[in-house]
Image (spheres, rainbow, N blue to C red):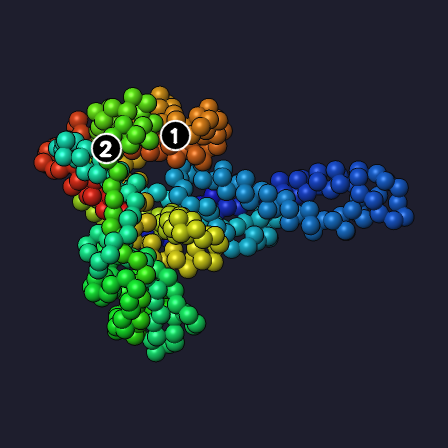
């Protein structure tokens, strides 16, 4: 087998491979001989069909199969022999061609990973959040838990901030009436709907009365026929209710699985959860700070576009799944274009973090992988089954290993880069991590 490699620009490489014709012929002959033992052709006894007949009937098909199989195997051999770090699946650049000397020649194009020079970790400047969970943060979370379990009691007055209004409405725009007949019931909590003009109108209507108003419906309104449109609406307030928060008493505490019913035990559990959340959010911010510095240090790094396309498609499919839609290939391809930019950043980040790990001998810690899997598994009723699932699924295991390796790289960078503490509140860290994680 002869191999030549041509740099066609960027990260693409063209492999031209020439396969010995004699090798192909021998494989075809062997295949036909095996076939002759089992093939049934009218007029001949099984195993007694002349090779000339076998070759006439099945020779072309056998050769196509052998050439296809040999191409796949030889591509892998060629990639290995040329020490190419292939980033995406090779694609044939031309159909196999029979040469005058009987050999078979084909060419394929592959994308390779970029070569990254040495990264000076000491020159990287990383910001590290300096934050802690305060009693005020615990109070806020306790209040959130109360609000999650609040009830509503009807009041005989117009609605105020925080009240819940149940209303019937009908609206008519240039495109028609919504609903086509009758009215539609809707529940609105004043101050939380994001539809300020609607809330102001409702605050002036007593229960049992109605009013006609003109509204500009927001783009995200849950009735698609009204979203982003101006319409005349009739609002009829059915009921106004004010929130009633539960007391933080023994019954409330026990509802969270704390048998003692002690408020301080609940506060301690809340603090523990917030501290874990703070740790994860801080890690996210440190990681994004590290990635920013790596990208700044290697600004011209090329990334394999095939990998970027796959990542963009994966992000599109994930979004569809989160929205409860079936991520069919057509819809995924349609949405993938809008994810190219964040996908390219993710790929770039992964390459640079991986390179930092390789250059500094950082290897995946199997104990940390086990801990990460057990952390996830312990949130399920049968942890052992979940652990078995992860270790039995190479894709799931690889995802955890990649995540753990990135955490190890971040920990290493914190010990070797220039780290500047940044005073932040708990809420600032959480909000910052949420924003950066979505980029």
Residue at 31 percent across and 66 percent down: it is: 236
Q: Nearer the viewer, mark 2 or mark 1?
A: 2
The residue labelled by disc 2 is 248
Q: Are marks 2 and 1 in contact (CB under 8 Å)?
A: no
Q: Residues within 10 Å of mark 2 (few under 14, many from 20)?
A: some
The residue lying at 59 percent from left, 46 percent from top is: 68
Q: What number is the disc on residue 139?
A: none
Element under disc 2: loop
Q: Quadrant of residue 205?
A: bottom left
Residue 323, percent across and down?
40, 52
Q: Earlier in the sequence, mark 2 or mark 1?
A: 2
Res 143 seen here = yes
> Against 364, is 155 above or below?
below
Q: So how many labels did they put on this image?
A: 2
Which circle marks residue 379 in the picture? 1
Q: Disc 2 to disc 1, how far (Cα)? A: 26 Å
- What residue is shown at x 29% (from left), y 21% (from top)? 260
In the image: residue 310, left or right of residue 54: left
């Amino acid at each position: 087998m002869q191999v030549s490699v041509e740099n066609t620009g960027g990260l693409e490489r063209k492999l031209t491979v020439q396969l010995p014709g004699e090798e192909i012929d021998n494989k075809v002959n062997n295949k036909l001989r095996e076939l002759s033992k089992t093939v049934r052709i009218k007029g001949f006894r099984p195993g007694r069909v002349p090779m000339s007949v076998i070759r006439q009937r099945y020779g072309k098909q056998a050769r196509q199969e052998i050439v296809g199989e040999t191409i796949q195997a030889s591509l892998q051999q060629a990639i290995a022999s040329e020490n190419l770090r292939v980033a995406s699946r090779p694609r044939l650049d031309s159909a196999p061609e029979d040469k005058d000397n009987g050999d078979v020649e084909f060419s394929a194009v592959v994308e390779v990973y970029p070569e990254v020079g040495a990264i000076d970790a000491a020159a990287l400047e990383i910001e590290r959040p300096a934050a802690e969970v305060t009693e005020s943060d615990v109070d806020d979370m306790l209040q959130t838990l109360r609000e999650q379990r609040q009830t509503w009691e009807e009041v005989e007055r117009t609605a105020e901030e925080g009240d819940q209004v149940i209303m019937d409405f009908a609206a008519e725009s240039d495109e028609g009436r919504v609903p086509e007949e009758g009215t539609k019931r809707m529940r609105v909590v004043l101050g939380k709907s994001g539809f300020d003009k609607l809330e102001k109108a409702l605050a002036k209507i007593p229960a049992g009365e109605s009013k006609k108003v003109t509204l500009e419906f927001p783009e995200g309104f849950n009735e698609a026929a009204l979203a982003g449109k101006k319409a005349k609406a009739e609002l009829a307030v059915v009921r106004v209710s004010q929130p009633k928060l539960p007391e933080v008493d023994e019954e409330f505490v026990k509802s969270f699985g704390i048998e003692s019913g002690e408020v301080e035990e609940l506060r301690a559990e809340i603090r523990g959860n917030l501290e874990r959340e703070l740790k994860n959010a801080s890690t996210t911010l440190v990681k994004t700070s590290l990635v920013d510095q790596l990208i700044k240090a290697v600004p011209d790094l090329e990334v394999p576009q095939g990998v970027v396309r796959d990542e963009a498609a994966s992000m599109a499919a994930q979004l569809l799944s989160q929205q409860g839609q079936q991520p069919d290939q057509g819809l995924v391809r349609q949405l993938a274009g809008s994810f190219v930019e964040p996908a390219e950043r993710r790929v770039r980040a992964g390459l640079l973090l991986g390179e930092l790990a390789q250059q500094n001998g950082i290897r995946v810690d199997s104990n940390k992988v086990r801990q990460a899997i057990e952390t996830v598994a312990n949130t399920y009723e049968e942890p052992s089954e979940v652990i078995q699932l992860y270790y039995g699924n190479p894709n799931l295991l690889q995802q955890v290993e990649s995540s753990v390796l990135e955490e190890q790289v971040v920990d290493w960078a914190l010990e070797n880069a220039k780290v500047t503490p940044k005073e932040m509140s708990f809420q600032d860290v959480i909000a910052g991590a949420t924003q950066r994680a979505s980029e």
